[in-house]
Amino acid sequence: MEKDIKDLLSEHEFFRGMAPAALELIAGCGKNVKVDEGRYLGREGEKADTFFAVRHGRVSIEVHSPERGGVIIQTLGPGEILGWSWIFPPYRWLFDARAVEVTRAVSFDGACLRKKCDADPAFGYELMKRFAVVIARRLEATRLQLLDVYGKAAAP
Amino acid sequence: MAASSPGARVLERPELGRLLEILKGRGYTVVGPTVREGAIVYDAISTIEELPAGWTDEQGPGTYRLKKRDDPALFGYVVGPHSWKKFLFPPEMRLFSARRTGASFRIEPPEGPPPRYAFLGVRACELAAIAVQDRVFMGGDRVDPTYQSRREGAFLIAVNCGQAGGTCFCVSMKTGPRARSGFDLVLTEILEEGRHEFVIESGSPEGSEVLAALGGREAAAPDHARVDRAEARAAGQMGREMETEGIRELLYRNLEHPRWDAVAARCLACANCTMACPTCFCSTVEDTSDLSGEHAERWRKWDSCFTMDFSYLHGGSLRSSTKARYRQWMTHKLGTWFDQFGTSGCVGCGRCITWCPVGIDLTEEARAIRASDEGQHHGKGH
Amino acid sequence: MARPPRPDRTGPSDPMRPSPFVVRRTGRELEDAVTLELEPERGAREFPFQPGQFTMVYAMGVGEVPLSISGDPERPERLVHTLRIVGAVTRAIGGSRRGTVLGVRGPFGRGWPWESAVGKDVVVVAGGMGLAPLRPLLYRILGARGRFGKVTLSYGARTPEGILFARELEKWRGRFHLDVRVTVDSAPSGWRGAVGPVTTVLPGEGIDPARTVAFACGPEVMMRFAVVELRNRGLGADQIFVSMERNMKCAVGFCGHCQFGPTFICKDGPVFPYSRIDALARVREL
């Protein structure tokens, strides 16, 4: 029997510990998606009305520069969240997001969820608390990458 | 204290030359204090006349001057810029030569037997320093073979200090002023009431042999009393002290103390202290080659934790600030030395204070940290 | 005190004296890293060592550097080093051909205490060239795979081209019940693996802190942050072992260069339980 969205969310690490009522609210804005390898989940500059809870597969966050071509900055896997640009204006993707392999996720309508957060601040707070952790962890990882610790030593 | 030690003798000043003759006859190179370029240094000597008779040293933080005494004392000074580590742990030493043989190479160890030194005039703090380096070079699982061969071949004639130097603090470090062990012979110069003589005691079987050959008269109670008085006089003249209680833990608790920044503002990282210190043992290895590449040598040379290169790793120095380097030296000397070797690395000789161009005094630094022990207040632990 | 002196003991057993070893095989691992296989020129046919130990390798007349042993401890007929070319000495050593003779002293140091992981799960965390001194440990574990529980290798490199022993990692992943998780700091589009710091590929769910031992080697910053993550997962500081590095000259505890607080990295390390260096690791410029 096919699982409904709420069941899928209760298995996902991001939503762990959320009250059933809150999960119900979120599930209402979500739908199950499958993204083929190489397809984009979001593109730099485009409207960011969606975010994703990755369930299976791998998604890359990429940037394209003329000198270097396409560069993968980070990858995300099962249990992780892709996309927070839906939370604040201008609601646009900053980077490309692409499925590295076949990826299954729950995608959420950002506008729908923003309305629900405005209507129920307590629910909104729960959701934002979790996003704060996601963003903080992503920043920590980025800082370590920025240190470029494996780089070549400066010439003696 | 005033008991008569078996076999102690008293030798008149004119007869002291016999000591050098006996030592040379036993195959020793005698090394002792002598005046050179305005300082009393240790060098090979062949006669008593080369000793700094009638000289004394005036020492203070960053200052050293020789001054004429108004008596002809042979040992009326304390320690100078040299220490005996110069002979046991030579400043430069070839570890081996290598010669190309086709695609390969052959290692040739240095030739010749090790030198046999007789050290004349080893002060109590210096005996302690030699004992400290004994632990460093011979006390662990590995033994440094060149230190060991020079050390085992050395004959030590200690001299009890009759006066304290300007930067001495052997009393608080419990290393002097009286030499108690670790010597073959110990001399105390007695210059009073028209006497100029030496009370000599033995500290080893070989010392006793030499003592027996020296002659002189048997020491009696008044002679030992004079020795005790000399010790008391020197002990009473200490101008500074190191509070040693819990100093290791104190330093561990205060690795971020602002005093380190203060001393770093003065320290020139000139490395004088490490060169003069009788226990500092850091060295470096230098590999050299001639132009043809056919002959190479490996040398061991004294090094200092104060150099930028010392902690070089992966393109930079790990201790690039003077603060980090001064902290390393002092916390090693007074703190981590205990973890490594079971004793303090400091013997209270005062050289680092005298020979520091800006007169940094580690007893003062330790006192300042103790006075505002940040670890106690903030509960920072090790 | 004074005794009849012994002759200078700079014979073949003098730890400061290198022995000649012949290069039998060379291999380029990365653009700036090579692996050399050495054999003693004469005398003993083997060079026994513990995983995690290192040697001092001498290029005659040029200089000497510490190098991690990266070979299989069960095959001591070959002494294997993997090194990165960073300066004159490593360039001379790394430029060796078959038949070049290098000087070797060692092995030195305390190696990975793999026995403490028997019967437990093992997490190996490597970064960049840090995989080299961990490879002997992995060989030992894989050679007795049944004696250990779950074994994970989390490895981070700068880019896909910087992944050391890439082919071997593939082989291990395929064959040995070894969970190999590789990540890079950045990659060109098209890379199908993970991108992010190595802390993001540590095992998460399923770690039983009571029966896990971790071994980590890589740049010091990377190790510090990996240890934070491991401790967040419940591992105690005495269950995590790291390999430290400092400037070395003598490698036998006399020259003083490798001091790290009270420890001499050459003889008290290079492998330490993290509990021993926890307080030291956070002091700047120690």
Image (spheres, grey):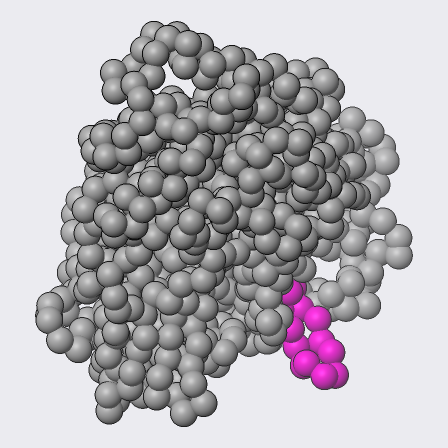
Question: How many numbered badges does the structure rendering display?
Answer: 0
Residue numbers of the magenta segment: A55-73
Q: Is residue C252 left or right of residue B90?
A: left
Whether residue A65 is in magenta: the answer is yes
Q: Is residue A100 left or right of residue B131?
A: right
Residue B155 in the image, given as x and y percentages of width and height: 31, 41
**Residue B11 visible to the viewer:** yes
Residue B378 in the image, given as x and y percentages of width and height: 69, 19
Residue A1 in the image, given as x and y percentages of width and height: 43, 44
Dividing the picture into quadrants, the one containing residue C121 is top left
Q: Is residue C93 above or below residue B115?
A: below
| Of residues B58 and A37, the one drawn nearer to the viewer in this rendering | B58
Q: Is residue B168 left or right of residue C233?
A: right
What is the magenta segment's predominant secondary structure? strand
Q: Quadrant of the N terminus of chain B?
A: top left
Residue A33 in the image, given as x and y percentages of width and height: 59, 57
State the residue at coordinates (35%, 73%): C58
| Of residues B180 and B300, the one drawn nearer to the viewer in this rendering | B180
Q: Quadrant of the C terminus of chain B?
A: top right
Q: Is residue B197 above or below residue A135?
A: above
State the residue at coordinates (53%, 21%): B194
State the residue at coordinates (48%, 40%): B279
**Farthest-out residue, right:** A90
Q: Is residue B222 above or below residue B331?
A: above
State the residue at coordinates (28%, 57%): B114
Whether residue C18 is in magenta: the answer is no
| Of residues B132 and A115, the one drawn nearer to the viewer in this rendering | B132
**Residue C244 visible to the viewer:** no
